[in-house]
Image: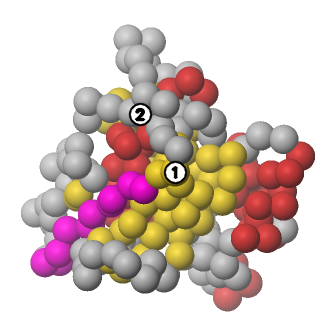
Amino acid sequence: MTDDASTDGTMPNGPSTSRSAAIGLTPFHRDGQLKGMLIGGRWPETTLEWTQTLVASLRIACRPGILPATTVFGVLEERPESCAPDTVGMMLAVGAVIGADFVEAGKFLPEHPPALVMLHPPSQTRPSLPECSEVASGCVLLPGVPELGLEHRAGWAEAEADGTLVTLRNQVGVDPAADPDTAVLAMLLAA
């Protein structure tokens, strides 16, 4: 796939797009664990671009020990006070999908986030291809407003740290209850 994310977290513009700026991800951590990623350059504008951002995130999550458990990230249209000038927003870890306290994590989400991302580290991913190892997987949910005719959209992917894309799927008109990842993300939105 030519529009795919590179291993450094940037997504080059492919032949099908006229956008001038690439979308970049810069991870940040605390105590060696991934706490979020700054989004630079410009915002992803389509379902496919959000899924490509997911793939770049998975390549970061594949690094040994950086993501110890399945984690949800809320996308914020805010910039930290000290960041690169091209930063447009960030993906901030809301919490690991472990324990009863997880539902409380939904209270820390913005009221209408543009996207929610769930990343599963290699230790919690069963690769869809048996010959692949150290595969991270994840989902991005782009919440819609069905009562206004705006459908939910989502993307799912599996990727290896070396850049190998194992699976990629996008869908418009998602029923969040039909998939475990989107169901969890929708539950957080409703919390």
Are the residues tagged 2 and 1 within 8 Å (C-beta)?
no
Give the mark toward the camera: 2 or 1: 1
Residue at 36%, 69% in the rendered image = 39
Residue at the spot of label 2:
62
Give the residue type at disc 2.
Cys
Q: Residues within 10 Å of mark 1 (few under 14, many from 20)?
A: few
Can you see residue 33? yes
Q: Position of residue 81 (x, y in %)?
A: 43, 83
Give the residue type at disc 1.
Arg
Residue at the spot of label 1:
30
Magenta region, residue range: 19-28
Q: Position of residue 2 (x, y in %)?
A: 16, 49
Residue at 41%, 33% in the rendered image = 62
Say if 11 sits above or below 130 in the image: below
The residue at the far top in this view is 131
**Dot placed on the residue nearer the N-terminal end, 2 or 1:** 1
Residue at 49%, 81% in the rendered image = 77
Q: Secondary structure at mark 2?
A: loop
Q: How many marks overall?
A: 2
Query: Distance of mark 2 from mark 1, alpha carbons?
Result: 17 Å
* Residue 22 on the magenta segment: yes
Indicate the quadrant where residue 162 lies: top left
**Foreground of the two, 137 or 74:** 74
Taking the image as shown, residue 16 lies to the left or right of residue 154, namely: left
**Foreground of the two, 171 or 102:** 102
Taking the image as shown, residue 10 lies to the left or right of residue 180, namely: left
Q: Secondary structure at mark 1?
A: strand
Q: Position of residue 116 (x, y in %)?
A: 58, 63
Can you see residue 51? no
Dominant secondary structure of the residues highlighted in magenta in the image? strand
